[in-house]
Image (tube, helix red, strand yellow):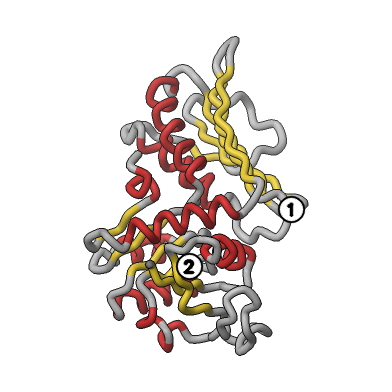
Amino acid sequence: MVRLIITGAAGKMGKAIIGVAGQDRGFEITGLTERKGHPLVGKQDPLTHLVIRDDLEEIIDNCDVVIDFTEPKSSIAHLKLARAHKKAIVIGTTGFTDDDLAQIKDAGDTRVVFSPNMSMGMNLMFDLVERATRILKDNFDIEILEMHHKWKKDAPSGTALKIKDIIEQTDKDKTWEEIYGRQGVIGERKKDELAVLALRGGDIVGEHTVFFAGIGERVEITHRAYSRENFARGALIAARWLVNQENGIYSMKDVLGL
């Protein structure tokens, strides 16, 4: 049985992970945390009957894996604690700065799965986008569109930026011109433009489409998430996989064997 601590336990993703893990006998939730000052700190979670704490360090020794979907500053702090206590950590937070990402990449002395999207379907899409780009990039224009709920704080989404990076890595010698919005008389689209456009509204869990637009034909690769449970299931698959790995920084591509 894999023992879990779930940070951000009162958030949308925290609740989803608690709900899915609670139905799987392969997991035991041994701790829940929230940020200091949160109104639910000190209260009992209704599903696990655990008291929500505000200090991960006090309980981290009681777990095998920390699952973290919080915000960048907290995630980096939780990563440092995982390293200090030699615990595995699954990080699904987005919105990191370059400095944050450098700290994550430097954490190879512990076991980390880091992915902006834990969905199995989305990670298959990453693989399909890479394959399609290698074949189509010289003759098709590539655009990325993402849609999320109105409460999302970062834009573009971490998943859309991951897609952008995958596309750019298919041709490291090419100078891609990244576009994050268009307005006014901007002239014709340049051959090497790569647009990442973000829409926000309602309660959309997440939708990403990559358009490969050619002359007389178009290829679209789309992933739509209708529930956060698919992200929760992916995080739990990552946690179960990670406990048996050597120290290192892994992605969902590693977890799924893509």
**Is 124 situated above or below 96?**
above
Q: How many marks?
A: 2
Dot 2, crowdedness within 10 Å: few (<14), some or many (≥20)?
many
Q: Quadrant of residue 247?
A: bottom left
Three-letter amino acid code at the position of disc 2: Asp
- Residue 94 has which mark? none
Q: In the image, what residue type sits under mark 1?
A: Asp
Q: Residue furthest front?
A: 25
Q: Residue furthest right?
A: 202
Residue at left offset 70%, top offset 49%: 204
- Residue 34 picture quarter: bottom right
Distance between the Cα atoms at labels 1 and 2? 22 Å
**Left or right of 91 in this view: 10:** right
Disc with the residue nearer the chain's start (1 vs 2): 2
Give the x, y percent position of residue 85.
Answer: 30, 80
> Is 192 situated above or below 45?
above
Secondary structure at numbered mark 2: strand
Any part of residue 77 in sight = yes
User: Residue 231 location, x and y as percent?
Assistant: 54, 53
Front residue of 15 and 193: 15
At a point 43% along the width and 27% down the height, the residue shown is 133
Please state, as top left, top right, bottom left or bottom right, where the N terminus lies in the image: bottom left
In which quadrant of the rendered image does the C terminus lie? Answer: top left
Judged from the image, the secondary structure of the residue bearing numbered disc 1 is: loop
Which residue is depicted at the point 52% across and 63% down? 21
Q: Which residue is mark 1?
A: 203
Picture coordinates of residue 18, whole percent (x, y): 56, 67
Which residue in the protein does label 2 denote? 68
Q: Name the residue located 60 percent from the left edge and 62 percent from the top edge.
A: 16
* Residue 42 location (% of width, % of height): 61, 89
